[in-house]
Amino acid sequence: MINTEAALLTAVKEPLVITTMQVDDPEPNEVRVAVSHVGLCHSDLHYMDGSVQIDLPVVVGHEVAGVVESVGSAVTGLRPGDRVVGALTPSCGLCFNCEAGWPTQCQRVAEVRLRRRPAYTLPTGEPIARLGDIGAFARHILMREASLVKVPDGIPLHVGCLLSCCVITGVGAVFRGAQVRPGSTVAVIGCGGVGSAIIQGARLAGASAIVAIDLEDARLEAARGFGATHVLNGTVDVAAAIRDLLGDGVDYAFEAVGSARTAATALKVLRPTGTACLVGIAPDGTELTLPASDFFFGEKRLIGSYMGSGHAHQDITQFARLYLTGGLLLDEMVTTVIPFAEINEGFELMRSGEATRVVVDVQA
Ligand SMILES: NC(=O)c1ccc[n+]([C@@H]2O[C@H](COP(=O)([O-])OP(=O)(O)OC[C@H]3O[C@@H](n4cnc5c(N)ncnc54)[C@H](O)[C@@H]3O)[C@@H](O)[C@H]2O)c1
Ligand SMILES: [Zn+2]
Ligand SMILES: [Zn+2]
């Protein structure tokens, strides 16, 4: 067991508090990682705001990169000093869904996640929960070997961390979720970290038009750099504006905000037979009210995509290569890198819409 520092959430709607906590020794299949950088994802904010439930006290944070510090006795593929990013969707590889190619829907995930002792404890011995069994807002974390991917030396860890959540989620939603076809037209609602990755995925898929929609003009300007061919402020009638721009609705619309309203917009901006893909996480209990005729007369499709709907090891490895060859712009997604002590200010920046991604340097 070691002592480390973590940004603890003890009550919803309260700031994170940097606190000393204890990290258990790695179990045989686990690795202790000295965290280098963590991207602030809006999913963390959902738990902090209480719009999505989580046990308290908890360490949230999941978009993580770091360096392996020590390994459990059964670890074979990682060594101290390896540079790694998180592959956040644990899967057994054996259940029906894993076998069928849907590891993000593994049916034995609870078994995979089982741990004999709490990974994190307060000095009093009280257990601390970890978001998704990760809890990355800490200087040291425990991860299963299978939940880490080694990254090439050419990838700085302050951009590498993005691969583990917003990039795999966004690019994966395009290729594995919606399966965007070359030449098709795409709308992306919400241009933060996830939306920017969706825009880049659509560019890589060969979309002929990519309409970026956000409430912040600075996000729209950044969206152009990622590949958006048109931008719209979400305060206008987006469906009408898209028809004006393109002469029709879009083939694919991605929702990357997390609300019933923007989900309804995603369906509305489609041309008949188009596909709307929900990626944003809406508050617990959110229900959708949608025009039924869009489905039976308009033959529209509504799907969702979780963590890129894919195989994290394969996708992270391939997206890392795409970064190195210039196809994926990750440096441009990092608006600012802040020290650990300023993590609450980082979330304020996210709330303001002034950043594509805020990354925390956990060692600073
Ligand atoms: N499905 C998944 O696997 C997955 C993974 C990661 C994140 N998420 C979710 O995706 C969503 C986006 O995450 P993020 O980290 O990119 O968030 P973010 O805060 O970085 O970006 C959200 C963007 O949406 C914009 N926005 C807000 N309201 C809008 C509106 N009405 N119309 C248009 N734009 C609007 C904001 O200005 C901001 O730029 C969140 O709900 C997050 O929880 C889902
Ligand atoms: Zn995330
Ligand atoms: Zn499984």
Image (cartoon, rainbow, N blue to C red):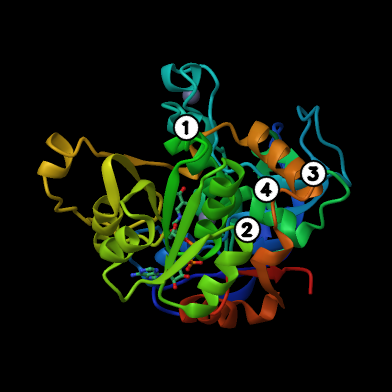
Instruction: State left or right for residue 194 relative to residue 251.
Output: right
User: For ligand 1, which image quadrant applies?
Assistant: bottom left
The answer to whether the residues at label 4 and label 3 have Cβ atoms under 8 Å apart is no
Q: Looking at the image, is mark 3 or mark 1 earlier in the sequence?
A: 1
What's the distance in space between the residues labelled 4 and 2, CA to CA? 9 Å
Q: Position of residue 245 (x, y in %)?
A: 38, 62
Specify whether tag 1 is near ligand 3 (CB below 8 Å). yes
Give the class, few, some or many, for how many residues have Cα within 10 Å of label 4's Cα (few <14, many ≥20): many
Helix, strand or loop for disc 3: loop
Q: What residue is at 45 percent from the left and 26 percent from the top? A: 108
Could you classify mark 2 by the number of other residues whose Cα lies within 10 Å: few (under 14), some (14-19), or many (20 or more)?
Answer: many
Q: Earlier in the sequence, mark 4 or mark 2?
A: 2
Residue at the disc numbered 2: 136
Secondary structure beneath dot 1 equals helix
Residue 65, position as x, y percentages in the image: 72, 54
Residue under numbered circle 3:
151
Residue drawn at the location 26% of the way across and 64% of the way down: 240
Residue type for callout 3: Val
Proximity of marks 3 and 2: CB atoms separated by less than 8 Å:
no
Vertically, is 4 above or below 28?
below
Residue indicated by mark 1 = 109
Q: Which mark is residue 142?
A: 4
